[in-house]
Image (spheres, rainbow, N blue to C red):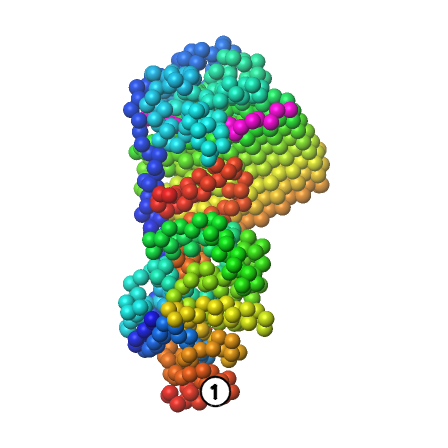
């Protein structure tokens, strides 16, 4: 009992204040007035020099949003958000939009450097260790730079901020935007449709295997500012792309809102692999501050034999409300969801996935690993359903929870709905604790307590870590250790 | 090397006294066997030596190389060279045996202010040690102790011991669950570690193991005390006559 109790006390003490990305940078910002109205939406649209149809799309979403109620079904508690007390647009004055690396405010470059995200292509090339990754850097409401654009262009891949894409490829954006997550989808998605500011756009053309990993790195810097990111990724017939998303925010006493929408479209035989390491500021040990993360992510396996795979490592945010899902529309399509959700301190996570089987011979796989410590609450919520005409749908779900201490909670809420008798669904769930015996065994071998917990937890999540691209896997393992123990490195 | 003086210890949670005035000295280079009936406190003693917090020392002291170790936590004791081969090795799911070994070895080195082992160096050492113990290298890719047979677990304990090169080795019923061939291999593994600067404490119920690992001294533990000590002939005597006479004599 004693050793584990001590660990629990330690974990309780550490406070999520160990957050090492909590610094703030003073940068002069161009902001819209606080609050939400049609004026503000027009302001955002004008700042982005959007075409008329885009503005109309936003306004329609806004009018719809006004009629909606905030959902309450998730197992999360937070005071009512005052949507008029938020800035919906904040862009660095020096760098009001995507530009070339030489024109980016050096202060902003420093921010990304400090975060370990190199934006200079030469530097990335110089670093022999890391393989090359193209980055779209989003700072508050705008993308400040996108790297390796030229090289990608040669391969036929379009990778740019969504604001740029709306101007440069309006037809493509118009065709796909909202086709997976309609503006009417849910409260936060509708809000996002009205006020989204930036995010990434990717199109990998027919038959092309994207020559490098693509990524977007989101940074919230400005106070009281919401971040409403919008990302759209399309893989045409036979195309392949692996995409990574990372995010951090300064440490603040107020809560900040992040409400993103991500849409993926995979045509015939295409494959999209989407990985996230979510590390928003989680709040302090008393539960003060932290990001409210209300995210709608959905992939549409639109073509036959297409595949979409979501992998997420969730360690940050005060509240996480997030269900990356797959619509398995094409015959023979496949959806995957691999998740590690770590909650500590007062964090609340309600996350999971939906696998919606519509086509014939579709399959899905869900592996979810929840780790709860401190006084956190960690819920897996997942839905697997088959349509009447979806012959031979298959799903395998495995949900494992690991508790550290006895003041936290882990919950599993599966919804299973099979309207076709040929469906084969398997569901396994376990809940365990790090045992005294395991901990003592590690200690006896000379492994100190913090390292022992990190080792045991990393063993617990191994199946999911294996799904991450190499560069991320190492980072993610470290991050999990840090979130649980507060010991850096 | 090891001096246990009038040790009293109880279960922290409910205060039950398990070790009741135990004295034992083991010199460097010595192999000491501890025997005793079920429930007499042998495993408890091994846990207390390694610093398990479930037990509280209420009286007496444990000196290791002349210094009290009661204030050291288990990982510190391990890094200083105290190793316990568990009676029931614990499963660590998802952590490959190889990875576990590497973390353990490097954490100990870090504590002692030594440099980390390079990966090739580490792999070479593991290969050598596992060959000697006839452990299939494929087994080392599997999560530690998960799905290992009883005998494989015991062999893996000795592999860890061989790699960590401890100074004080405590083997808690390492012979139980081993087939005859494995018993020989394990005993050879232990004998290979015998050296003038290393002490071994072998906890066992059977004379058989002591035919292979010949002890310098044999001690009988009963109700938390050493009630009789002798040389290797004491083990033979116990094998033939059981504990009753010794217990009666001590009472
Ligand atoms: N944590 C504990 N909680 C309750 N009882 C305990 C605990 N640890 C030890 N005991 C008790 O202390 C006594 C000694 O146990 P121990 O495991 O040390 O015996 P042993 O000599 O190793 O026996 P065996 O030969 O069967 O392995 C037993 O009665 C056991 O039930
Ligand atoms: Mg025992």
Residue B182: quadrant of the picture: bottom right
> Looking at the rendering, in which quadrant would you find the C terminus of chain A?
top left
Residue A296 seen in the current view: no
Q: Position of residue A61 (x, y in %)?
A: 49, 19
Residue A331 seen in the current view: yes
Q: Residue at x 41, y 13 (%)?
A: A47
Q: Position of residue A254 (x, y in %)?
A: 32, 32
Secondary element under disc 1, as helix, strand or loop, is helix
Q: Which residues are magenta?
A: A207-226
| A239 versus B229 height, above or below | above
Q: Nearer the viewer, residue A113 or A164?
A: A113
In the image, residue A217 lies in the stretch drawn in magenta? yes
In-image side of A272 versus B244 (left or right) = right
Q: Position of residue B101 (x, y in %)?
A: 47, 55
Label 1 Cα neighbours within 10 Å, binned few <14 / some 14-19 / many ≥20: few
Q: Residue at x 49, y 88 (%)?
A: B241
**Magenta stretch: dominant SS?**
loop
Q: Nearer the viewer, residue A403 or B197?
A: B197
> Looking at the rendering, in which quadrant would you find the N terminus of chain A?
bottom left
Q: Residue at x 63, y 41 (%)?
A: A395
Please tell me how many numbered marks the rendered image carries: 1
Q: Position of residue A424 (x, y in %)?
A: 67, 43
Q: Which residue is mark 1?
A: B237
In the image, residue A333 lies in the stretch drawn in magenta? no
Q: Residue at x 38, y 54 (%)?
A: B109
Q: Nearer the viewer, residue A236 or A289?
A: A236
Q: Nearer the viewer, residue A274 or B189?
A: B189
Q: Chain of mark 1?
A: B
């Amino acid at each position: 009992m004693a050793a584990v109790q001590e660990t629990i006390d330690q974990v309780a003490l550490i406070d999520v204040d160990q957050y090492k990305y909590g610094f703030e940078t003073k940068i002069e910002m161009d902001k819209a007035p606080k609050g939400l109205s049609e004026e503000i939406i027009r302001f955002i649209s004008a700042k982005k020099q959007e075409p008329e149809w885009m503005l109309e799309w936003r306004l329609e979403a806004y009018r719809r949003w006004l009629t909606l109620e905030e959902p309450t079904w998730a197992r999360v508690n937070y005071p009512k958000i005052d949507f008029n007390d938020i800035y919906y647009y904040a862009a660095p004055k020096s760098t009001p939009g995507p530009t070339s690396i030489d024109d980016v405010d050096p202060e902003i470059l420093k921010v990304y450097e400090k975060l370990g995200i190199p934006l200079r292509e030469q530097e990335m090339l110089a670093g022999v260790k890391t393989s090359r990754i193209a980055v779209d850097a989003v700072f508050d409401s705008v993308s400040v730079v996108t790297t390796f654009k030229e090289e990608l262009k040669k391969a036929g891949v379009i990778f740019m901020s969504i604001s740029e894409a709306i101007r440069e490829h309006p037809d493509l954006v118009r065709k796909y935007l909202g086709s997976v997550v309609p503006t009417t989808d849910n409260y936060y998605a509708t809000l996002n449709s009205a006020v989204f500011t930036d995010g990434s756009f990717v199109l990998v053309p027919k038959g092309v295997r994207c020559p490098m990993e693509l990524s977007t790195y989101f940074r919230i810097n400005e106070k009281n500012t919401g971040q409403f990111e919008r990302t759209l990724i399309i893989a045409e017939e036979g195309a392949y792309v692996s995409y990574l998303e990372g995010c951090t925010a300064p440490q603040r006493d107020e809560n900040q809102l992040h409400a993103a929408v991500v849409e993926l479209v995979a045509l015939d035989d295409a494959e999209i692999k989407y990985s996230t390491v979510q590390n928003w500021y989680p709040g302090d040990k008393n539960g003060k501050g932290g990001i409210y993360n209300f995210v709608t992510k959905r992939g549409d396996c639109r073509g036959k034999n297409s595949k979409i795979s979501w992998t997420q490592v969730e360690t940050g945010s005060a509240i996480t409300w997030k269900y990356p899902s797959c619509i398995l529309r094409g015959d023979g399509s496949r959806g995957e969801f691999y998740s590690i959700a770590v909650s500590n301190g007062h964090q609340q996570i309600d996350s999971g996935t939906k696998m919606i089987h519509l086509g014939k011979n579709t399959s899905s796989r869900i592996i979810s690993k929840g780790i709860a410590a401190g006084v956190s609450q960690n819920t897996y919520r997942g839905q697997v359903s088959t349509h009447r005409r979806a012959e031979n749908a298959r799903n395998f779900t495995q949900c494992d929870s690991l508790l550290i201490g006895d003041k936290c909670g882990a919950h599993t809420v599966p919804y299973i709905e099979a309207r076709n008798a040929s469906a084969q669904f398997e569901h396994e769930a376990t809940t365990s604790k790090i045992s005294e015996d395991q901990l003592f065994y590690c200690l006896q071998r000379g492994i100190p307590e913090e390292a022992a917990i990190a080792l045991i937890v990393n063993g617990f999540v191994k199946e999911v870590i294996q799904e991450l691209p190499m560069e991320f896997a190492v980072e993610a393992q470290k991050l999990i250790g840090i979130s649980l123990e507060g010991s850096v490195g | 090397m090891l001096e246990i003086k009038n040790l009293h210890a109880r279960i922290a949670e409910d205060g039950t006294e398990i070790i009741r005035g135990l004295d034992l000295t083991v010199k460097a280079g010595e192999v000491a066997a501890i025997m005793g009936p079920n429930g007499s406190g042998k495993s408890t003693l091994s846990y207390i030596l390694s610093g398990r917090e479930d037990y509280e020392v209420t009286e007496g002291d444990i000196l290791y190389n002349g210094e009290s170790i009661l204030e050291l936590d288990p990982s510190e004791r391990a890094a200083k060279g105290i190793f316990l081969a568990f009676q029931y090795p614990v499963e660590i799911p998802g952590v490959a045996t190889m990875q576990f070994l590497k973390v353990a070895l490097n954490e100990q080195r870090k504590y002692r202010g030594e440099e980390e082992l390079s990966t090739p160096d580490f792999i070479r050492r593991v290969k050598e040690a596992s060959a000697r113990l006839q452990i299939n290298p494929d087994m080392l890719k599997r999560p530690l102790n998960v799905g290992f047979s009883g005998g494989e677990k015991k062999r893996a304990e000795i592999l860890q011991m061989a790699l960590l090169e401890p100074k004080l080795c405590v083997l808690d019923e390492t012979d139980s669950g081993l087939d005859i061939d494995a018993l020989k291999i394990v005993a050879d593994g232990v004998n290979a570690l015998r050296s003038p600067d290393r002490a071994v404490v072998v906890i066992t119920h059977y004379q058989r193991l002591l035919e292979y690992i010949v002890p310098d001294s044999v001690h009988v533990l009963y109700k938390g005390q050493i009630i009789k000590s002798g040389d290797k002939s004491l083990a033979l005597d116990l094998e033939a006559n059981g504990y009753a006479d010794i217990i009666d004599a001590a009472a």
